[in-house]
Each structure stands twice: as structure tokens, then as C-alpha cells.
Amino acid sequence: MAKKIVHRPELTFWEKLYIPQVLTGLKITSIHFFRNLFLHILHRLGIFKHRRAGVTIQYPEELRPLFSRYRSRHRLTLRDDNTPRCVGCMLCETVCPAKCITIVPGEHPDPHVEKYPVRFDIDLGICVYCGYCVEVCPEDAIRMDTGILDLASGTREGMRLDIHQLMDPELRKPVTNCSLDFPHQCEVTGGEMKGGWDQVRKYSDNQV
Ligand code: SF4
Ligand code: SF4
């Protein structure tokens, strides 16, 4: 097969100076700067409001509104007794293309509920935010609607959400206090089993 040799084009003298490119960039930036400054002054005076001017959002103090279908950090939805709606069917773990969901199911005392998650982890360090876990869930037990976008962490471990953070999206690592009553593998106490169904309101009230 014949080879086609493509030579890199030589830069001209002016291109090697890079001064025209720098001046072009400054010109574009200045046009935007003075246009926005001028329009904002006019808006303050109550005129030319139909012409939009650029607005800087002061993140993170000020947050841009998200579309309702935007996929943000995950959460587990809850039953009235503050236990997860999840029935431990493993569909989300199976469908996850990044294999970042880990569920350990346990037997639920309610005969109408097959199982529940003793452990439920999502490693956001490898999650690709595809939303398949939400779509596949038959119980509407997992959603990506928290609106939380700031996920940075200094460690890989810090990117892994456990059941405490998934049930309460306000929690931030390190989580030091466990408020879950149902039996679960508790990361707060070092991965030991903690809680009992007799401590959960619905079951302690003998409503089952
Ligand atoms: S959003 Fe996608 S990659 Fe992330 S946990 Fe759900 S299924 Fe897995
Ligand atoms: S698909 Fe839904 S019910 Fe099934 S394990 Fe995942 S979160 Fe739980």
C-alpha cells in the first residue's frame, strides 16, 4: 500500500512570534468584557433589558438550577419507618456497567417484603452516572435527584458511599454517628453488624 507523507506546515515569521494570536485573544476577551459591563449598566438604569448580558455564578455559594432529569448524586428512598425501600433484588448491581454497586441482602421480617440491604455501597470513583440503576429498580428505591454535584475527595475510600450516606444525602464523610435502627453492616462502627428489627418503630409497635 502506497504511503502518503504529510509534512507539517512551517509556521510563518508572524506565527512564530505568537503576538497576533495573543492580540486576537485579548480583543475577543475585551469585547465580551465591555459588552457585558455596558449592558449591566444599562440594565441597572432599567433599559435594554431584552438584551441578555453574561452572568457569573458565584459557585459554590450560588448554585445554578438543575434540570429535573439531571443525574446527580444517588440516594436510597425510604419507607415510613425510616428503612430503605430497597428489596435487595440485585438488579441495579447486575446492570451497573461500572460494577460499582455492592449489596449484601438480608431477610426482611415482613413476609410481604422479600429482602432488604444489610449493606449497600456505591463507589462514585468509578460510577459513570449512566442512571441504569435508577431505571432498572422495580421499587423506585434508588434515585439520582439529590442535586449534589460536589463529590471531590482526597482518597479513593472517600468516594465510596455507604448505606448511611445513601439514606441521608446530607451526611458527609467521615460519618461518625449512626442513626439507623434496622440491622445493617455499619461502616461507622468498623463494619460490624448493628441494630435490630425490634428497634424499628413499625416492628416494635407489633404492627406486623
Ligand atoms: S449510575 Fe450507572 S455506573 Fe453509576 S451506579 Fe448507577 S448503574 Fe452504576
Ligand atoms: S434495583 Fe432497587 S430494589 Fe433492587 S437492589 Fe437495586 S435499589 Fe434495591
Image: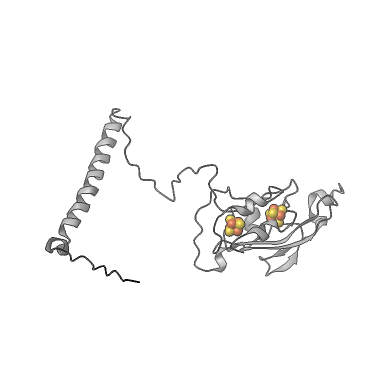
Seen from the viewer's position, the closer of residues 107 and 188 is 107
* Ligand 1 placement by image quarter: bottom right
Looking at the rendering, which quadrant does residue 186 occupy?
bottom right
Position of the N terminus by quadrant: bottom left
Compared to residue 90, the image places residue 140 above or below, namely: above
Whether residue 37 is situated above or below residue 24 in the rendered picture: above
The residue most toward the front is 1
Q: Nearer the viewer, residue 52 or 42?
A: 52
Left of 131 or right of it: where is 197? right
Indicate the position of residue 88 as horizontal and vertical percent values. 74, 57
Name the side, left or right, on which 64 lies relative to 100.
Answer: left
Q: Where is residue 13 drawn, in percent x and y? A: 12, 64
Q: Quadrant of residue 197?
A: bottom right
Query: Which residue appears farthest toward the top when viewing the image?
Result: 47
User: How many discs appear?
Assistant: 0
Horizontal and vertical percent for residue 91? Answer: 70, 56
**In screen coordinates, is 11 left or right of 186?**
left
Percent across and percent down for residue 87 are: 75, 54
Q: Tell me how the rendering is colored.
A: one colour
Residue at 84% in and 55% down: 109
Of 103 and 9, the residue lying toward us: 9
At x 48%, y 42%, the residue is 65
Please name the residue shown 62% across and 59% down the image: 96
